[in-house]
Image (tube, rainbow, N blue to C red):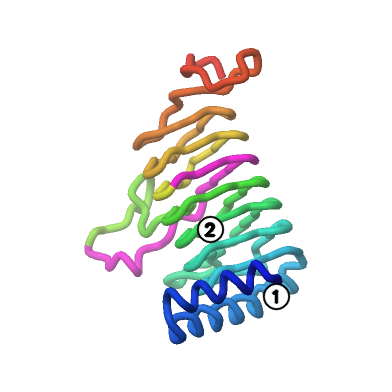
Amino acid sequence: MTSSASSAARAFLRENGAYVSAHKAAQVIAASLRSHFVQRRLHTTGLRLGPGHKLVGLAHTHIGRNLRTGSGFWLEAITCNAGETYSPHLSIGDNCNLSNNVHIGCTHRVTIGSNLLCGSNVLITDHGHGIYRGPAQTAPGISPKHRPLNRDGVILIGSNVWLGDGVLIFAGANIGDGCVVGANSLVRHTLPPRTLCVGSPAKPIRQWSDSAQSWQPYDGQN
């Protein structure tokens, strides 16, 4: 342990007491061991998972180098639910950093580029419980947990994207490279690259200008 890390540990102990400090240390050790074994399973490097994570469907998942997650990370490539089978493809690029309580769910295809910065309480899912458009729609008398999951949704998130706290991303989302999505926004459509987007549904309000080297009001030309 480095001197700075040792000093931080002593300060945490003074502020929070022996029980809380021991509990935190045990969580860190357990998360480190799990990260090691998951990293070997995924044939990647630099993986660091926070405590309380849930990982399902790793055979259908590709994770790039140096993924960092906070606590409560939930990643699920779903192959079977309520008697239905699925063929998910879930991919995360290199050097992605995810904060606490990020949930990524996939029944068909979720592709995330490199260098994603993701806030807390973010949901990224290409499916929902029940079918509400087209043929064979789901009747409301069926318990939601027994309704079939959508199997044809696609989510594409480019590289160098920043997602604020509480962002919701659903099937049909195509977020361009360098995009910033403001807190509590909802995305289920295309957002142009190098734009700052907010709202429900999220809309571009500013765009990066190479000539001005600054973010300018969005003019719809990006």
Task: Tell me which segment is drawn in magenta.
Answer: 141-164
Left or right relative to 84: residue 28: right
| Residue drawn where x is 48% and y is 18% of the image | 218
Circle 1: residue type: Met
Residue 219 on image: x %, y %: 48, 14
- Give the number of the disc on residue 24: none
Q: Quadrant of residue 64?
A: bottom right
| Residue drawn where x is 65% and y is 46% of the image | 115
| Residue drawn where x is 49% and y is 78% of the image | 13
Left or right relative to 36: residue 51: left
Is residue 141 shown above or below 176?
below
Circle 2: residue type: Cys
Q: 114 or 51: nearer the eye?
A: 51
The residue where tag 2 is placed is 106
Could you tell me if residue 82 is visible in this image? yes
Q: Earlier in the sequence, mark 1 or mark 2?
A: 1
Q: How crowded is mark 1: few (under 14 residues within 10 Å), some or many (20 or more)?
A: few
As helix, strand or loop, the secondary structure at mark 2 comes to strand
The residue where tag 1 is placed is 1
Residue 45 on image: x %, y %: 76, 64
Does the magenta stretch mainly form a helix, a strand or a loop? loop
